[in-house]
């Protein structure tokens, strides 16, 4: 049920952005200072294809979420009590490291440290996904669980991030509806109106969090009004304006990407987040997601990026290099396959990881970039899970013969 609500929410955001652009003749969201130079028909066609893509990803999720692998459920046992303690210690360590070095500050304005190789692999934002799924309903260490949640919120705000609020809301929806049987008419009503309620409540939260987000990044902004906060929240959920922008300025984006002397940036970008500098010296290059906005804003910093969707990303990358396009597609499919197996092996009961699997597919459709979807996110599981196994947070289930 939570997956349907999230899908509905993104479709609302898509429709709002597309409608606003066709009515005003201007872009919305990040590009709201620019006027459209393509026809309304083209915008409508891109809207239809994007919406169709959302429907397809949900169908793909429904078909593939059922367990069909060699890993049996519960092959690994997760101990929530130890997970709570481990996450608490990791949080404290990362907070202390961030206060002293500013490594991990949003927007690329942070510092550097030779100790990053110790803390960077234990990416708190990735561990939080697992922590919430395993510990939210566990009766053990309830007080410590909420202490960890509060510390995570404080730490994320210190880094200049606010997207975690949506993540927590989605997880709460998942746990609330997980085992409830709901009649079809009520299900339709919930799918239609729950996203609107989330936008209204989210606007109130975003209004308060917005100034802290930019203050942490060293930027000053004026306070948002409530309706302005709701508008920014809705448009921020939609990658559609950037997608249209890349479609309109395809030649400029392609030229910016080609201007770099670095080859195979899609592959390199996936590893620059997880490899230390002594293994990968050249990390300063612009990604395709950065070039998308740079085509409109030439002075844009290289340390930021914007999503523009799987469809336009794929078309653009294939037009730049067929080989890089094929490589990106194969890596994405392979990574989804591997992560599905990992999720299956960690499940303590059937369907426990369904919401995380859905968010993974949604992230691939929204962000598309291999660096953004995997290199800066789920790839950290390759570090995190072995550490948790070594320290007994995750144990191999004993098979009785």
Image: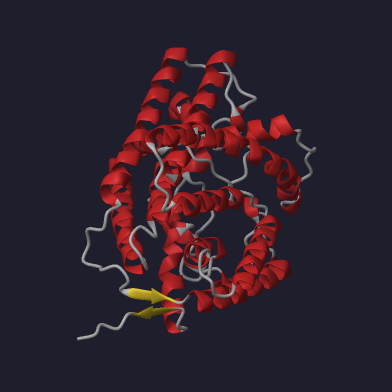
Residue 45 occupies which quadrant of the picture? Answer: top left
Residue 176 visible in image:
yes
Whether residue 110 is situated above or below residue 326 in the rendered picture:
below
The foreground one among 381 and 219 is 381
Number of numbered markers: 0
The foreground one among 106 and 37 is 106
Task: Report x, y in % for residue 191.
Answer: 46, 35
Is 200 on the left or on the right of 133, as rendered?
right
Task: Report x, y in % for residue 260.
Answer: 47, 45
The foreground one among 390 and 298 is 390
| Residue drawn at the location 41% of the way across and 53% of the way down | 179
The foreground one among 27 and 63 is 63
Is 319 on the left or on the right of 219, as rendered?
left
Residue 39 visible in image:
no
Task: Report x, y in % for residue 29.
Answer: 60, 31
Residue farthest toward the bottom in the current orientation of the protein: 401
Task: Report x, y in % for residue 103.
Answer: 64, 64
| Residue drawn at the location 30% of the way across and 45% of the way down | 62
């Amino acid at each position: 049920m939570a997956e349907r609500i999230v899908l509905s929410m993104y479709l609302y955001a898509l429709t709002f952005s597309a409608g606003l652009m066709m009515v005003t003749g201007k872009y919305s969201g990040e590009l709201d200072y620019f006027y459209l130079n393509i026809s309304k028909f083209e915008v409508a066609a891109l809207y239809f294809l994007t919406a169709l893509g959302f429907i397809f990803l949900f169908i793909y999720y429904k078909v593939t979420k059922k367990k069909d692998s060699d890993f049996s459920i519960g092959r690994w046992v997760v101990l929530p009590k130890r997970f709570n303690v481990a996450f608490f210690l990791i949080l404290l360590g990362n907070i202390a490291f961030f206060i002293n070095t500013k490594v991990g500050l949003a927007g690329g304005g942070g510092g550097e440290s030779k100790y990053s190789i110790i803390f960077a692999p234990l990416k708190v934002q990735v561990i939080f996904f697992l922590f919430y799924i395993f510990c939210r309903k566990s009766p053990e260490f309830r007080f410590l669980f909420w202490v960890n949640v509060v510390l995570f919120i404080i730490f994320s705000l210190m880094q200049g991030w606010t997207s975690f609020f949506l993540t927590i809301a989605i997880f709460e929806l998942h746990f609330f509806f997980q085992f409830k049987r709901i009649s079809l008419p009520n299900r339709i009503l919930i799918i239609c109106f729950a996203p609107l309620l989330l936008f209204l409540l989210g606007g109130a939260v975003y209004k308060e969090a917005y100034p802290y987000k930019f203050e942490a990044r060293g930027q000053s902004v004026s306070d948002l009004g409530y309706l302005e906060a709701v508008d920014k929240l809705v448009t921020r959920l939609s990658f559609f304006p950037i997608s249209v922008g890349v479609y309109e300025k395809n030649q400029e984006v392609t030229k910016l990407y080609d201007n770099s002397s670095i080859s195979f940036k899609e592959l390199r970008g996936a590893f620059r987040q997880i490899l230390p500098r002594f293994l990968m010296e050249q990390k300063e290059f612009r990604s395709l997601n950065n070039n998308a906005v740079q085509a409109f804003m030439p002075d844009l910093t290289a340390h930021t990026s914007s999503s523009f969707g799987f469809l336009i990303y794929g078309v653009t990358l294939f037009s730049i290099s067929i080989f890089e396009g094929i490589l990106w597609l194969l890596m994405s499919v392979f990574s989804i396959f591997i992560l599905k197996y990992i999720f299956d092996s960690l499940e303590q009961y059937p369907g426990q990881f369904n919401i995380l699997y859905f968010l993974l597919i949604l992230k691939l459709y929204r962000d598309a970039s291999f660096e953004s979807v995997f290199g800066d996110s789920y790839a950290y599981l390759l570090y995190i899970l072995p550490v948790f196994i070594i320290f007994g947070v995750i144990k191999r289930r004993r098979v009785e013969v």
